[in-house]
Image: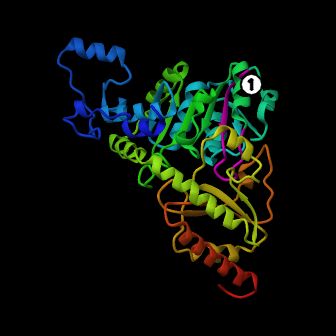
Amino acid sequence: MKRDTVLTHAGRYPRQNHGIVNPPVYHASTVLYPNLDAYEAAQKKREYGKTFYGLSGTPTTFSFEEAVAKLEGAFRARAVGSGLAAITAPLVGCLKAGDHLLMVDNTYAPSRRFCDGVLKRYGVETTYYDPGIGADVARLFKPNTRVLFMEAPGSLTFEMQDIPAMVAAARKAGIVTMIDNTWASPYYFRPIEHGVDISIQAATKYLCGHSDVIMGTVASNEALADKVDAAVRDLGFFASPDDCYLVMRGMRTMAVRLPRHWETSLKLARWLREQPEVDRVYHPALPEDPGHALWKRDFEGSTGLFSVGFKAIPRDGLAAFVDGMKLFGMGASWGGFESLVLPANPAPIRTATSWKAPGPLLRIHAGLEDPDDLIADLDAAFGRLRVVLGGGKA
């Protein structure tokens, strides 16, 4: 089946659920067994897809995970309680004391905290690398390198990575590859089809689409599925059936939501790059973006998240810009139906590369509002900024 059909039908079993279209929500902690033999057999096997105890998942969980696995082209997918849990669980499952991890320098900031905190305390060494390194990442391999972690594009600065070249180098060295694929989602990029071992998403974002759930998913190939399962089980990283239901409901509309996010983000990006106060727009779907060729080669589309870098402006100018917005909210998430802006400074969270820009960075998520209304809101924001730059008050 093609992806739009997968989104519509995967994980649905109406004949098993009284003809009901959507899988019901099973709330469970205790699961009862008819006799000792049945209990001991279930305890011994602990099979995936069988509810032994509520923590191991319910039929709602398994329906959702099946839908994600089919969309990802993965052997198996697991739902966990957050995007960060989706990052940390496979890292814990594939690393041990004495191992070496290669982590991309533009990674999600909580991923860096986990590497520099928890993993370091437990004897795992992390090396951060330039996201543009490509196949030369092999120069950083050590005898104890076990995992190469990628994120393309980075969620603040939007550098692309040459994923096939890096995967080929890692595979030759026997190194596990993982990627945070939240920006594109498996609707526009399926990492496992490109040879990546583990694909990670914050399902909070585009899979859900409604800004009301915190969840992550980990999709893996057959070789690593059991390691991921063991880490999720041992860490207790399970998602609630209610959240699985809500995210699966959100997935049904991805085929109509994501093209709209893409179209609106490009319209905003093109308008923004014409403003005299703007230094650069960071969006891999723009032809002039340094990562455009890689994006065009490997990805089937773009989504609503990008950044705009300003020329040198004072803080009160930035405040005038963002504080008076009518349609753009200021918040740390993205991927929902609403538009957002978020001031960001990547400099303190880069170590392998340096971040140098003349002015502040503003991350923008293009929601599902009319793009002309969003441009009008941005135009008014530039008007307030220009008052400040002209020596007046906004």
Q: Residue 135, how many percent across, how many down?
A: 78, 30
Q: Residue 196, how many percent across, how many down?
A: 62, 28
Q: Residue 370, how many percent across, how many down?
A: 51, 67
Question: Up-down: is 94 above or below 381?
Answer: above
Q: Residue at x 51, y 29 (%)?
A: 73
Q: Residues within 10 Å of mark 1 (few under 14, many from 20)?
A: some
Q: Main secondary structure of the magenta part?
A: loop
Q: Is residue 183 magenta?
A: no
Magenta residue span: 144-161
Camera-side residue of 253 and 55: 253
Q: Residue at x 31, y 26 (%)?
A: 51
Camera-side residue of 110 and 248: 248
Question: Up-down: is 336 above or below 66?
Answer: below
Farthest residue, direction top: 37
Q: Is residue 157 magenta?
A: yes
Question: Up-down: is 279 above or below 388?
Answer: above
Regarding mark 1 in the picture, which secondary structure is present there? helix
Q: Could you tell me the amino acid type at mark 1? A: Ala
Quarter-wise, where is residue 151 in the image? Answer: top right
The residue singled out by tag 1 in the image is 169
Q: Residue 46, how many percent across, how many down?
A: 36, 19
Quarter-wise, where is residue 138 in the image? Answer: top right
Camera-side residue of 286 and 229: 286
Quarter-wise, where is residue 251 in the image? Answer: top left
